[in-house]
Image (cartoon, rainbow, N blue to C red):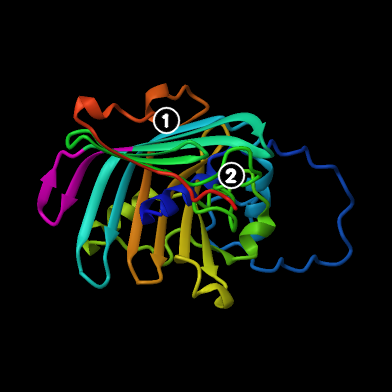
Amino acid sequence: MPPLLCVVSLILVACQPAPQAEAPTPSPAPVEQTPPPANPAPADAATPDITTADQLLDELERADAKLRSLVADIKYDRVFEIQGDRQIRVGKVYYQDSGAIVAGVRDRKFGIRFTSLQIGKRLENEVYEVIFDGQWLVERRPAKKEFTKTQIARPGRNFDALRVGQGPFPLPVGQKKADMLARYEAALLPGAQGLEANDEKETPALLEFVKGACQLKLTIRPELKSTEELHEIRLWYKRDAGGAWLPRLARTMNRAGDVSLVQMINVALNESVPTEVLDTTSPKAEDGWNVQVREMTPEK
């Protein structure tokens, strides 16, 4: 699985409308002072009603029932620890949930269309598309007419490739908080804590970008370090004027020490998604395309 997909899919956890808060019920003043909650909210918390990581995860778990699509501009910035290289891709991400259940699995798809690649000081206008339709993963480079299609899930099987702990794309929209906490330890942190850009000169702008957001830190459990790709995930969420949680930023570190930053800009929820950006149909070889289709090994 391309590391990029792991990062992008994780930040979609926060792309749901927040539930409406219930009106508080009047009650007499307590006789004794209530003790502070475990993992209390940081002093600079942007959302005063969110006081713990558990509370934030609970709210996100409950809040996704109305999410049907997400569209956003995206900036993917990765530094490779061993090579010392830095790559930046800019483009657009699309997510769609039809609301249907097919073979016991939610019908969900996502696509990413990058339009530029920067390596060091060299900037290339390169279109690179990645699409997952719930069964097939497609990588497409139109300029080179390269098309690769890999089968990830078998049709008709109750296998969710987007479920944490089950498939290769850990997209926890609609998943249980327990699935997250079984693999990661969660903490609610001040928004600015631990945030550094891959170029230190860009850190002030990045801090301004997440101003007013909540930060959730997920650290891989020690017993899973040898099997999980991402060892640390930091996610920044911010409510919009309508109360919807919107993703702002994800910062991840993998087993090799590579650091990735994904910024989500101009996030729009529940708007129409163009059909072509989620289309995994193979092009025709006679039109000059180099087409590779990789089916799963037949079951015995």
Residue in the foreground of this view, choosing between 56 and 126? 126
Range covered by the magenta-colored residues: 113-126
Q: Give amino acid for label 1.
A: Leu
**One can see residue 276 in this view:** yes
The picture places residue 139, in percent across and down from the top left corner, at 33, 41
N-terminal label among 2 and 1: 2
Residue depicted at 40% across the width and 67% down the height: 254
Element type where label 2 sits in the image: loop
The picture places residue 249, in percent across and down from the top left corner, at 41, 50
The picture places residue 159, in percent across and down from the top left corner, at 62, 47
Residue depicted at 64% across the width and 43% down the height: 157
Q: Which residue is mark 2?
A: 173
Q: Which residue is mark 1?
A: 278
Name which quarter of the figure residue 137 lies in.
top left
Q: CA separation, marks 2 and 1?
A: 18 Å
Q: Which mark is residue 9?
A: none
Q: Give amino acid for label 2.
A: Val
Residue in the foreground of this view, choosing between 131 and 81? 131
Image quarter where the N terminus lies is bottom left
**Would residue 263 be found to the left or right of residue 160 on screen?**
left
Residue in the foreground of this view, choosing between 98 and 186? 98
The picture places residue 222, in percent across and down from the top left corner, at 56, 77
